[in-house]
Amino acid sequence: MEKLLNQILDQMQKLTDTVTSFDSGQKKLVAQVSQLENGQQELVAKFNKLDGGQNALVSQVHKIEVGQKELTTRIDPIEHDIKEIKGLTSRIETKQHVILDHTVRLSEYHTELKIEMEDIKEHLLFNTHKITENERVMFKLRKQ
């Protein structure tokens, strides 16, 4: 019986050692779980910080998109105005060429008129001279 009691005691000692070992392991597991929870909390905090940063970036991207739409809205009328200006410039250039052609023709006409006027002036001077000369001759003839 004593042997049996010793065996039971040994078994109980082994069970106590095992329970102590389990208890020690459990404490280690609890410590590790606590570390994991702390790590998880840190990760959650970092994730929240990243999420906040992402939200800020999304907000900035949205502002940029709104600004881009405003610029596009402003650029459309400017592009329309530029097309109108190009059309007007083209018409002005065409009119300018017409005016230049007219100016050239008028200059040529003016030069021709000047030459003809000079010629007429010379004819008039000649005729005046002849008339005067003829009148002198007539005067002399009458006088005689």
Image (cartoon, rainbow, N blue to C red):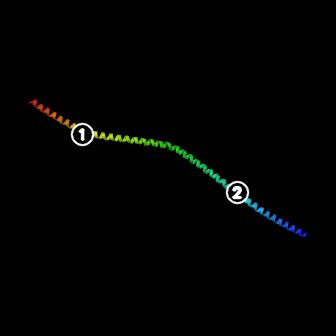
Give the residue pinned by disc 2.
Answer: 40
The residue that appears at 55% across and 45% down in the rendered structure is 69
Q: Which of 112/24 is in front?
A: 24
Q: Residue 93: percent from the left, percent from the top?
A: 38, 42
Of callouts 2 and 1, the N-terminal one: 2
Q: Residue 17: percent from the left, percent from the top?
A: 82, 66
Q: What residue type is labelled 2?
A: Gln
Residue most toward the left?
A: 144
Q: Which of 104/35 is in front?
A: 35
Q: Residue 123: percent from the left, percent from the top?
A: 19, 36
In the image, taking residue 100 as reference, residue 83 lies left or right, namely right
Residue most toward the top?
A: 142
The residue that appears at 43% across and 43% down in the rendered structure is 86
Above or below 133: residue 49: below
The residue that appears at 79% across and 63% down in the rendered structure is 22
Residue most toward the bottom?
A: 3
Q: Residue 141: percent from the left, percent from the top?
A: 10, 31
| Location of the N terminus (image quadrant) | bottom right
The residue that appears at 56% across and 47% down in the rendered structure is 65
Give the residue pinned by disc 1.
Answer: 115
In the image, taking residue 109 as reference, residue 37 lies left or right, namely right
Label 2 crowd bin: few (<14), some (14–19), many (20+), radius 10 Å: few
Where on the picture, by quarter, is residue 30?
A: bottom right
SS type, badge 2: helix
| Location of the C terminus (image quadrant) | top left
